[in-house]
Amino acid sequence: MLRSLPRALRIPSGAKRAATAIGASFVATALLILIAGKNPIAAFSAMFYGAFGSMDRIAFACNKSTPYILCGTGIALCFRARIINIGGEGQIALGGLGAAWVAFVWPQHSAFMAVGTALLAGMAAGALWSGLAAAIHLWRNVHEVLATLLLNFIALLLVGEALHGALGEPGAGFPQSSMLDNAYWLPVLATGSQLHLGIVIAVVVAVAAHIYLWNTTGGFALRVLGASRSAAIYAGFSVSALTMKLMLVAGAMAGLAGAVEVLGVHYRLIEGFSQGFGFNAVVVALLGALNPLSVIPAGLFFGFLEAGALAMQRQVGVPSSLVSVIQGLTMLFVLAALASTAQRKAA
Amino acid sequence: MDALALDLLVASMRIASPLFFVALGGILSERAGVFAVGLEGMMLAGAWGATIGTFLTGMPLVGIVASIVGGALVASAVALVAVRFGAEQMVTGLAVNILTLGITSFLLRMAVGGGRAPVIQVPLLPVWPVPYLSELPWVGPMLFTQQLLTYAALLATVPAMLLLFRTQMGLTLRAAGENPTAVFATGSNPMRVRMLAVIASGAVAGLGGAVLCLQQVGTFTDGMTAGRGYLALAAIIVGRWMPVGALVACLLFGAAEAVQLRAQALALPVSSYTIQMLPYLIALIVLAALGRSARLPAAIGVAYEAPKRPSA
Amino acid sequence: MRASPLLEMRGIVKHYGAVRANDGIDLDVSAGQIVGLLGENGSGKSTLMKVLFGMVAPDAGSIVFRGKELSGHLPREAIAAGIDMVHQHFMLVEAMTVAENIMIGWEKAGRWLRTAEIAEMIRETSAGYGLDLDPRAPVGMLSFGQRQRVEILKAILRGAELLVLDEPTSNLSPPEINGLITVMRRLRAEGKGIVFISHKLAEVTAVCDEAVVLRDGRVVGRAPIAQTTRADLARLMVGRDVVAPIVRTDCAASDPLLSVENLSVDGPDGQHLVSDVSFSVCGGEVLAIAGVDGNGQLELVEAIAGIRRPAGGTLRIRTTDVSRAGVAARIAHGLSFIPPDRSRTSLVSEMSIAENLALRDVRQPPYSRGVFLSPRGLQAAADRLIEGYAIRAPGGRTPVHQLSGGNQQKIVVAREMDRGPKVLVAFQAAWGLDPGATRFVLEQVLALRGAGAAVLYISTELEELLSIGDRIGVMFRGRLAGIMRREEVDLERLGLMMAGTSDDSATLAA
């Protein structure tokens, strides 16, 4: 129901807020580490080196950031129009499914065609899924949050279904597809490195989204809708057309993220490959103050955080699950900050 | 055939029982106007509390109390950020779920495991068959041969219904979810009502985690709730925000999973994944079918702002 | 029946910035008395009641109720003292029954709800007052009139001694109005005091004991009903020194540019907000429509602009039928619209002046080229319009919320007129503006008229209407009550039409 306009998602001026939220969550995390009897400084420096320590590490972290930037951009656009789309998890999963499916069903031999068709299929699958949520929301008046949330689980199960059936690798003890043909592997940016094309795609998409938001008539309409629904209607924009368009775009971006993961990291479709990406992308979008360009550093932050956490666990013995703590705390702090600013403004 | 059917029923009950408390708790929150997306985290915190509490003291009672406290703590975060500050409820729920996942996992290793994932084993609560009743055909094994917390969950439906529909407290809670301004006009503070409702919902949902640990699994593993909190949310929707309805929905979902686990034996034409999808599909269909007339509490999801006191 | 004074308000003063909403008002209500509080929009009646009910604190003055002083109080303290208000917007929970709504927060209902007892109480009391309510009915299924009765019953059961009814009959059908009048008489017979706020003279004269007329924040007349006529009251309500109209050059009216036929708009509960309205406006003419807020003018205008879907009727711009066209299409056909809500609809306060000027035409040159916005085009248009309309602002990039109300409205006016429309619909275009800004808006409207456009101008301010209207009509209860030429306007007749004419009195209970 569009009437529940989330006041707290008022468009923020966020870099300072993001930095404060991140700082606060690091402080809280440091306290946790202390309580657990470990040295926070050692833990954080292990994390830092784990993320930035070598070119390889940086490459790894950039790869990890890619789905966050892609999915986060789409979500940022939606949230900016006050459309709460939390369907990232399912859309990413289906994006991976779409890419894998097209690779097996319509195999291409030239790398260009292979990667191209697979990525497009991923985008289409993600867009289809978010479009479905939008349709249910627009025509049956179901809250878009509930629709996207429930469809997530269904999507994940669809992927599982596919992997246990048509796409499953025979003989594998694990629900995964067969390895994709070389043509489908996302090219790496430098020989020997693991840094794949995904990060470039992500940055390009974020920049394109930025241009869309600030330099096109469509983006203008989006911003008006986010500011006031009655103003958007008065201005002559169709709220339902705009909603559907944005959801499709966000779904396509999420689907692209899923396809990139499959083609660039795993080279096959694995059940559960998308776990946590969609929800974390919401945090990334909020951290990036709903601005596509700022989503890039926000997504990088998350990617590097996760990359570093693994090293932190190995070296200092502080569990990598701390990353979830940092992510969750950051999100809560950003939400609280956004909401209290909005409250103060309304007073 | 009979034996198979009975087995399915008993299994449904078993699988559904962790969901009962979670659904009941969620109803408290949603009826007061706050989306219960954080149920997953509340249940997980409850599971952690139950396992660690019992493990450290050897007393299941302590574990049960700890599960209530754990759930309530997570709910307090939601109450503070989403109700007191008025942040977006759904996103806040997601945030606490992520946070709880991390903290329980972290604390498990650091506080108990000495840095590594410990292997904890706690004894399961014993089955307490009700004399005479447990010997009845069908209902005997299904309803009267259960463990303590399952009985508690089933029985809790009654006070839940009474509270919501027969007391002033429940009336105010429901009004806060439908029209908080009306509550304010009668002299109560809707924000306080909502915050208390959310914390209470966490306390109750935490018990669901205790059911999972102390009655079924006997240990705590990272993220062990595996989406059950969202399943309970779906049950609330299908059950139309009524305690009995939600419980029946939980049973339905439990049956779905029981069928899915025995899919081989039953030689069904439908894949197990499709069956697992059923709860969410049903919830979605119910919402879509109801459409405009879905009986969500009218003010759910809308943050309440207190009007200012006129200066004297 | 006069008993001791129940309520004594003395010297109530309340300012909102430079506006004196209440300028030293005295009001007395005795037990067993119904006082009618009359006045147009902006006369100060709502402010006075907000002060009484504790929603707003006065700048000066005192309130004594049943011998006790009330100050700095909140609404629930007013309720506890025995004052209750039935607002225009009800505080009811639709999903709950009548009984449940009444029990919320009421200690008499008990911790364990004594539903059966309360239901019986409701049945008895409501029968006693002729309210006829079923405690088990879900409020969502009740009509507007019935919901109002629930609010009244709530007040009675909670022991209200003074009841304030704020424009209670706006959405009631004639039989429901009669029902309400009967209830009010019963309450009076029991010694309760009632303040009946209305602009409808027929009702006021039918049921009140005394009438108090407010204008511009002051009491301009106070008399027992028995000693006054409707004409007197109408004159008091609207009488003023009408400023000499802005000099207009007479234009020859051409063929109708705007034709409205049988337009009807229904509300969400099926109420007839606009009933079968027909009129046309010629090029070079201003049709001004008067009427107290809430008589359907807003809905009429929104239906014409394309923002609200009508229940029926046709709309033509020149000869083109635009009844099914969307907002953008109507703009393309030459329809401009100035809506009343600057804060949320006609302007986006976070955006810049330039962006707001482009708001409704952004897909057209010069604001964009193809899909892309043209910053140069936006800036050029902003510069031109800022100068042309004398908008006081640092530049086109200034966010609109930094501007004064007058300058904000200039942006809206500039945007809607610069398009060179065939038809301009303006609703409360000068609302909240100082006299200088108001004059500017009116001059612009006249200029547009001089250029041959048709103007539909709706306002609650009679001065404005009289200074620019060629013809003047009145909206009352969703109907267009009558259109007169400016020269034929008789203020008293106008006031009577705004307050409901003689055809209403026949249906009222004696």
Image: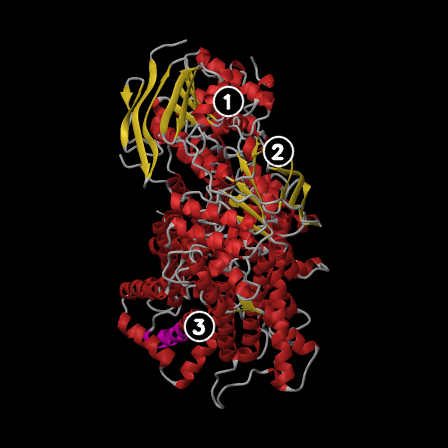
Residue type of the residue flagged with mark 1: Leu
Report the front residue among C52 and B119: C52
In the image, are marks 1 and 2 on the same chain? yes
Q: Residues within 10 Å of mark 1 (few under 14, many from 20)?
A: many
Label 3 element class: helix
Picture quadrant of residue C95: top right
Q: Quadrant of residue C132?
A: top right
Q: In the rendering, at what x and y percent does residue B47 appear?
A: 43, 54
Mark 3 vs mark 1: same chain? Answer: no
Q: Which of marks 3 and 1 is in front?
A: 1
Which is more foreground, mark 3 or mark 2?
A: 2
Question: In the rendered structure, which segment of residues is drawn in magenta?
Answer: A302-316
Q: What element carries label 1?
A: helix
Q: Read off the chain for label 3.
A: A
Q: Name the residue under label 3.
A: A296
Query: Badge 3 local density, few (<14 within 10 Å), some, or many (20+)?
Result: many
Q: In this view, does C117 lie above or below A226?
A: above
